[in-house]
């Protein structure tokens, strides 16, 4: 390539790169720990408590059935020597069928729990997204990353807007003007 061609290519590259570099210098970025926000907002705490109670009730039900099956197996083991081979095989098969049904019930319960959690959390997550968008708009943020899913390994805490998202969400209104980090909190 000639010198003239090299200069033309360099000029073209620079003309494309300068606007990108200039806009990148203006980009304001923040991050939020969505998992923490979800657990700290009032609605998230209430939903988590409801889900926990539901899970505990299901687990108690499954534990009760499991204990009943365990007792049935112990009874079968004790009486096995007095039974005929056909009766013992039939009882063992019935017990095995009940064990399989309980395992299937447990798996259905797990799937139902995941579905229930999704239904409980979806409206809360949508509202959190709205609060984040409102904060980003107010502060001129061009990018807000999720701390856990974005691959952030390290970021200064001054770029973390999680506390503000929780406050704004719980207040149920648009976020207020930014507060200085060291400003005293009114009680």
Image (tube, rainbow, N blue to C red):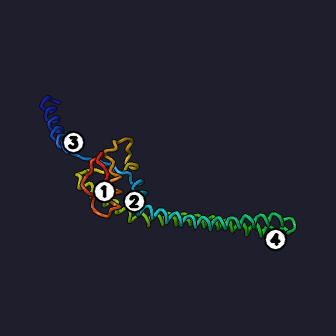
Q: In the rendered image, which residue does mark 2 sit on?
A: 41
Residue 27 is situated, as x and y percent measured from the top left of the image, at 23, 46
Q: In the rendered image, which residue does mark 4 sit on?
A: 87
Q: In the rendered image, which residue does mark 1 sit on?
A: 132
Mark 1 vs mark 4, foreground winner is 1
Residue 113 vs 179, above or below: the answer is: below
Q: CA distance from mark 4 to mark 3?
A: 81 Å
Q: In the rendered image, which residue does mark 3 sit on?
A: 25
Where, quadrant-wise, is the C terminus in this rendering?
Answer: bottom left
- The foreground one among 179 and 111 is 179
Q: Earlier in the sequence, mark 3 or mark 2?
A: 3
- Classify residue 62 as left or right of residue 135: right
Residue 162 vs 92, above or below: the answer is: above
Task: Find out whether the residues at labels 3 and 2 contact each other: C-beta distance under 8 Å.
Answer: no
Q: Earlier in the sequence, mark 4 or mark 2?
A: 2
Q: CA distance from mark 4 to mark 2?
A: 59 Å
Q: CA distance from mark 1 to mark 4?
A: 66 Å
Q: Earlier in the sequence, mark 1 or mark 4?
A: 4
Residue 138 is situated, as x and y percent measured from the top left of the image, at 23, 55
Residue 63 is situated, as x and y percent measured from the top left of the image, at 65, 64
Q: Earlier in the sequence, mark 1 or mark 2?
A: 2
Q: Quadrant of residue 118?
A: bottom left
Q: CA distance from mark 1 to mark 2?
A: 13 Å
Local crowd at mark 1 within 10 Å, few (<14), some, or many (≥20)?
many
Mark 1 vs mark 3, foreground winner is 1
Residue 108 vs 136, above or below: the answer is: below
Considering every residue shown, the one lying at the far right of the view is 82
Which secondary structure, mark 3?
helix
């Amino acid at each position: 390539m000639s010198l003239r061609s090299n200069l033309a290519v360099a000029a073209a590259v620079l003309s494309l790169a300068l606007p990108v570099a200039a806009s990148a210098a203006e980009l304001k970025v923040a991050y939020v720990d969505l998992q923490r926000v979800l657990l700290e907002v009032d609605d998230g705490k209430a939903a988590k408590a409801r889900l926990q109670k539901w899970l505990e009730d299901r687990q108690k039900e499954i534990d009760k059935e499991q204990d009943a099956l365990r007792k049935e197996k112990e009874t079968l083991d004790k009486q096995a020597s007095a039974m005929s081979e056909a009766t013992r095989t039939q009882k063992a098969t019935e017990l095995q069928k009940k064990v399989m049904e309980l395992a299937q019930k447990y798996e259905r319960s797990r799937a139902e729990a995941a579905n229930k959690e999704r239904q409980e959390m979806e409206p809360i997550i949508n509202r959190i997204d709205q609060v984040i968008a409102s904060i980003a708009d107010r502060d001129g943020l061009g990018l807000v990353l999720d701390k856990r899913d974005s691959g952030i390994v390290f970021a200064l805490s001054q770029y973390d807007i999680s506390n503000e998202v929780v406050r704004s969400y719980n207040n149920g209104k648009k976020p207020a003007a930014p507060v200085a980090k060291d400003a005293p909190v009114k009680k």
